[in-house]
Image (cartoon, rainbow, N blue to C red):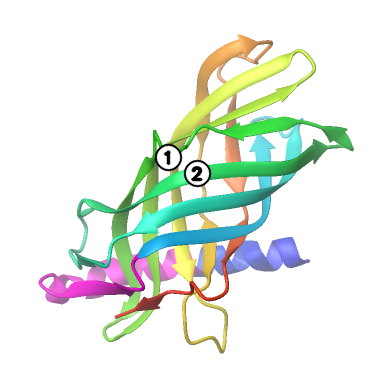
Amino acid sequence: MMHRLTRLAVLAFAALALLAFATGTASANRGLAIRPGGPIFAEGPIRINEALRVVNLECELHLEGVLRGGVPKIARLPEGELGQLTRLEFRECEAARIPWIVQGLTEPGSPSPVLYQSFLGTLPNITGVLMLALSVGVRIRSGRTDCLYKGDVPYLIWKSPGEERFNRKTCLPNRLTLFRTIENCPRESWIELEGTLIIRPGQEITLM
């Protein structure tokens, strides 16, 4: 039930995004302020869905990144880097009670740029921000299977009902395609990351 509610919430936010593109044009010269800027940490359950749904991995994801203090609100076009993903650490991964090793290839020495896409709502009442993490890499291994996937991951920063600050990061529909076969990977396979992470208490975001 919780999974279904999360999916419905994501679809609702995606619908609002279309409205945001239409209403944001008049505000193209205004800026989106993010407080606080700097390091950001989030964690929570993540699901890795394989192309044929043969293997669905359940993991705990620890995410580290950094956000700039602001970005121009320009409708319809991404406006440079809003920040970076600097670390993805997958923990306690398993499928059908079989442990898997999942490694995020985003590390401090090779961060993934994060682009601003759009904001949701109408000024000054922002309800969320759509972002896009570029070239996210994930390696999954178990037994004789060892596959490397890469792709862009859109996600939404939003806040729970009744909350004053933004404290949720939800992965939107994405596809990481097979980048390299190390051993025993189905041809043209891909994976999808699905889940909502909680921004660490004390680091919740204010958007203005």
Instruction: Identify the residue at image location x=62%, y=58%.
Output: 43
| Sequence-wise first label, 2 or 1 | 2
Corner quadrant of residue 101: top right
In the displayed image of the protein, which residue is found farthest to the right? 97
Neighbours of disc 2 within 10 Å: few (<14), some (14-19), many (20+): many
* Viewer-proximal residue among 92 and 158: 92
Residue 90: say if magenta.
Answer: no
Number of callouts: 2
Q: Quadrant of the C terminus?
A: bottom left
Residue labelled with disc 2: 87
Of 143 and 170, nearer the camera is: 143
Three-letter residue code for mark 2: Arg
Name the image quarter holding residue 36. bottom left
Q: Secondary structure at mark 1?
A: loop
Q: Is residue 66 above or below residue 86?
A: below
Report if the CB atoms under discs 2 and 1 are less than 8 Å apart.
Answer: yes
Q: Is 126 situated left or right of 3 in this image?
A: left
Q: What's the residue at 57%, 68% (across, down)?
A: 200
- Binning the other alpha carbons within 10 Å of mark 1 as few (below 14), some (14 to 19) or many (20 upward) gives some
Q: Position of residue 188 (x, y in %)?
A: 55, 19
Which residue lies most toward the left here? 29
Q: Quadrant of the N terminus?
A: bottom right
Residue lying at the far top of the rendered structure: 183
Picture quadrant of residue 82: bottom left
Q: Is residue 177 left or right of residue 132?
A: right
Residue at image location 76% in from the left, 31% down from the top: 100
Part of the protein shown in magenta: 13-37
Q: Amino acid at mark 1?
A: Pro
User: Which residue is the site of mark 1?
Assistant: 108
Image coordinates of residue 74 in percent, x first then y, are 17, 64
Task: Tell me, yes or no, whether the highlighted magenta stretch contains residue 28.
Answer: yes
**Which one is nearer the viewer's eye here, 36 or 180?**
36
